[in-house]
Image (cartoon, rainbow, N blue to C red):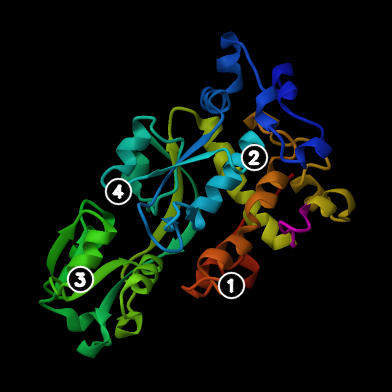
């Protein structure tokens, strides 16, 4: 049974749809903190979700000249805020470098890390972190000047490769070179911008990063068409939301918000029709997803409409992808393995039952 104070936090459906101050009615005594779940309680007391995002990568998280943020990571953060606090605007975006990201999460400076972080065994084995769901399946590749006429990474033997330091990306280059009898000279940089600048000045012959990241970097160069991404994919890079491991319930809540966005695409639930389907859907699965039939996630301190709010805030997974990375963006990336499971991809949500 959910604590009474939690239901005091919730508003009737018609008021929630008005996007009013959903979270302001939530209050709970200190003695109830442990019962509610430490991290969700702290988040609601603070009134904002703090998301660690990239310092500036087109398609994922980037500020325009007016200081407005946009990107895949930003839209995910808005979905979490809508699910947990009732409004997609209750977010604080914290730009983090690759060196800062995990330490910032461990220190409690952010609630959710959405910063191109690959799920690996060694990171998962650390007691500090919990990986809460893959939001993008990526792979590492190479960006090179077109006039080098290189068609394969095997032609980069002896080349200088710009790469972010202290990352799996750098380690992958070492493994790839050793496994293929190649020699790379690693030019390690601290930020994406530093890597692009070094590449632009000719300090390295190629730039290596996740393929999605390379696509975004390429678009920021003065002449994007003068550069090409090689077809080689040298690693698996499942990019995951990451949370501190101190509260498993919170990790599960983060995971199921992402599942809700994936399931919504599968069932044809969009930002535009979620409200109507919550009332009229013939599918029991859709009704459960949108909270029309019970509050299945009460044990995670989520009300019945958490998924509906997340979907309406940013759209389903496909809408978020197309807006930031796909056909509606300048990157025009194909869905590939990020397509739904029933369309040949890896995106799959467990049942909402």
Disc 2 packing (10 Å; few <14; some 14–19; many ≥20): many
Helix, strand or loop at disc 2?
A: loop
Q: Do the residues labelled 2 and 4 touch (CB within 8 Å)?
A: no
Q: Quadrant of the C terminus?
A: top right
Give the residue number, with chain letter if any, for mark 4. 97
Q: Does any portion of residue 85 appear in the rendered image?
A: yes
- Spatial separation of the CA atoms under disc 3 and disc 1: 36 Å
Disc 1/disc 2 C-alpha distance (Å)? 34 Å
**In this rendering, the label closer to the viewer, 1 or 2:** 2
Residue 213 position (above or below residue 5) = below
Please say if the residues under marks 4 and 1 sit with CB atoms less than 8 Å apart: no
Magenta highlight: main SS: loop
Cα–Cα gap, marks 2 and 3: 41 Å
Could you say which quadrant of the image residue 102 lies in? top left
Q: In this view, does 107 lie to the left or right of 303?
A: left
Residue span colored magenta = 268-274
Determine which of the numbered discs, if any, sits on residue 87 in the image: 2
- State the separation of the CA atoms marked 2 and 4: 27 Å
Label 3 – label 4 distance at C-alpha: 19 Å
Q: Is residue 101 above or below residue 303?
A: below
Name the element at disc 4: loop
Nearer-N-terminus badge (1/2): 2
Which label belongs to residue 344? Answer: 1
User: Tag 1 or tag 3, which sits nearer the N-term?
Assistant: 3
Residue at image location 80% in from the left, 50% down from the top: 275
Q: Which of marks 3 and 1 is in front?
A: 3
- Check whether the beta carbons of the residues at disc 3 and disc 1 lie within 8 A of each other: no
Would you say 99 lies left or right of 188 here? right
Q: Mark 3 points at which residue?
A: 199
């Amino acid at each position: 049974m959910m604590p009474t104070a939690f239901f005091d936090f919730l508003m009737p459906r018609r008021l929630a749809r008005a996007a009013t101050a959903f979270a302001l009615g939530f209050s709970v005594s200190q003695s109830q903190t442990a019962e509610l779940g430490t991290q969700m309680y702290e988040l609601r007391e603070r009134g904002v979700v703090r998301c660690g995002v990239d310092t500036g990568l087109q398609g994922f998280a980037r500020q325009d000249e007016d200081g407005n943020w946009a990107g895949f990571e930003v839209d995910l953060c808005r979905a979490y805020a809508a699910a947990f606090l009732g409004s997609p605007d209750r977010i604080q975006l914290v730009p983090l470098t690759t060196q800062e990201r995990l330490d910032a999460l461990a220190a409690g400076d952010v609630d959710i890390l959405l910063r191109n972080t690959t799920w690996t065994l060694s990171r998962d084995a650390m007691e500090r972190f919990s990986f809460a769901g893959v939001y993008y399946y990526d792979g590492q590749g190479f960006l090179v000047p077109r006039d080098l006429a290189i068609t394969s990474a095997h032609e980069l033997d002896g080349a200088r490769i710009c790469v972010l330091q202290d990352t799996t990306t750098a380690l992958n280059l070492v493994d790839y070179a050793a496994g293929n009898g190649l020699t790379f000279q690693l030019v390690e940089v601290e930020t994406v911008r530093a890597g692009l600048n070094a590449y632009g000045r000719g300090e390295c012959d190629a730039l290596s990063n996740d393929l999605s990241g390379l696509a975004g970097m390429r678009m920021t160069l003065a002449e994007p068409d003068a550069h090409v991404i090689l077809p080689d994919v040298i690693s698996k890079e499942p990019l995951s939301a990451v949370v501190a491991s101190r509260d498993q319930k919170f990790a599960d809540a983060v995971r199921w918000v992402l599942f809700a966005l994936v399931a919504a695409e599968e069932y044809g639930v969009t930002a535009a029709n979620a409200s109507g389907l919550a009332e009229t859907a013939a599918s029991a699965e859709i009704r459960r997803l949108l909270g029309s039939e019970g509050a299945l996630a009460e044990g995670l301190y989520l009300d019945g409409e958490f998924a509906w709010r997340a979907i309406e805030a940013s759209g389903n997974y496909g809408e978020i992808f197309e807006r930031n990375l796909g056909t509606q963006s300048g990157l025009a990336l194909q869905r590939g393995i990020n397509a739904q499971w029933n369309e040949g991809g890896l995106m799959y949500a467990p049942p909402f039952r």
